Amino acid sequence: MKQLSHAATAVACANIAFIKYWGQRDAHLTLPTNGSISMNLDGCLTETTVQCLPEAVEDSVWLALSGGEEVQAKGRQFERVIQQIERLRQLAGVSERVEVRSRNNFPSDAGIASSAAAFAALTRAAAAAFRLELDEAELSRLTRLSGSGSACRSIPAGFVEWFDDGTHAGSYAAQIAPPEHWNLVDIVAVISTEAKHVASTSGHSVATTSPYFPVRLEGIEQRLADVRQGILERDIQRLGQASEADAMSMHVIAMTAHPATMYWLPGTLAVMQAVQRWRVQDNLQSYWTIDAGPNVHVICEAKDAPEVEARLCELDAVQWTIVNGAGPEARLVG
Ligand code: PMV
């Protein structure tokens, strides 16, 4: 085995899906039941350093809290990181232990899916620390195998599609359009900062038990086409309508699977209804989407973002907001 003494630091964005990944064909390979489309979030970043330690006998993982203080990851959190490190170590044919240090630039208790940014940054940094030369598609496939499938969409820049053809080779993410293509904004309306009660991994594993799952899949190709075209033509209405429909469909699946999960809180519904009301009454073009939690992502064009954000902040249900534009690829910074 080779001996290395290397460190690499990478930064990656979280992403918000307009067409959701919800359900798996193959849990081991993290192969989804459908393709998905997202935008990287330039305001929600994870920075991760992977340091190879030739003398060390154990791996260690350190996570920074909001205040800057670092805590050592334990249990499942530690195992998930080290499983991904081990996958890359084997690919590189190296044996050294590592120290991993990771921090988010957004409050990690904000209930925003931070695992996508975390696993994209980890995979990018580890590949560099182990001197693996991988193209973007291969990096995306490897990131997908981390188990946080949506993380594979945080590898390319901007507006991104994760393809699904049922195979490992065909299941990776690629860019639809670069970040500068469209000044689209995602305003996260934070409703609750409590950790989600049902992890997305459990949601994926039971999705197909919903009687509505075939209905979701029937409509998915049309919604994917609408979102793709909406992005390419900068058509907020086309993108927004398809995104709202897809988020609703995902949550119907969650609510009707066995066991069923309701991710929304009363505040979630208040924001969804307000956004729809502003559209109908004032023609304010903003659209909601929601991941596996209660917080609402409100999508609009940059010209409308100050108005949408001001209105969101006036709602009792909204604790605070995070404003994001389309973000860059997972990249090395050191
Ligand atoms: O990548 P996971 O296993 O954290 O699942 C992501 C699930 C959603 O965020 C709800 C949808 C998506 O496509 O990002």
Image (cartoon, grey):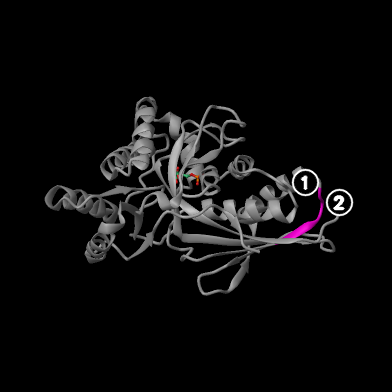
Q: Is residue 171 above or below residue 244?
A: above
- Percent position of residue 248, x then y: 31, 40
Which callout, 2 or 1, points at the residue further toward the start of the chain? 2
- Which residue corresponds to the image point at 36% horizontal and 42% vertical from the top-left? 231
Residue 92 numbered tag: 1
Q: Secondary structure at mark 2?
A: loop
Instruction: Say which residue appears at 37% left-offset and 50% top-offset.
Output: 182
Q: Give percent across and percent down for residue 191.
A: 33, 59
Q: Which residues are magenta?
A: 94-99
Q: Amino acid at mark 2?
A: Lys
Q: Position of residue 124 (x, y in %)?
A: 63, 52
Is the residue at mark 2 in contact range of ligand 1, meaning its CB lies under 8 Å from it? no
- Identified by mark 1, the residue type is Ala
Whole-number angstrom distance, CA of label 2 to CA of label 1: 9 Å
Apparent side of residue 271 relative to residue 325 in the rendered image (left or right) = left
The residue drawn where x is 38% and y is 25% is 214
Q: Is residue 302 visible?
A: yes
Horizontal arrangement in the rendering, residue 316 relative to residue 226 (left or right): left
Where 165 sits versus 98, above or below? above
Q: Nearer the viewer, residue 220 or 78?
A: 220
Q: Are marks 2 and 1 in contact (CB under 8 Å)?
A: yes
- Residue 242 within the magenta-colored segment of the rendering: no
Of residues 55 and 128, the one drawn nearer to the viewer in this rendering: 128
Label 1 Cα neighbours within 10 Å, binned few <14 / some 14-19 / many ≥20: some
Asked whether 131 or 212 is in front, the reply is: 131
Q: Is residue 295 visible?
A: no
Could you tell me which secondary element the residue under label 1 belongs to?
helix
Residue position marked by numbered label 2 in the rendering: 2
Residue 270: x, y in percent? 23, 54
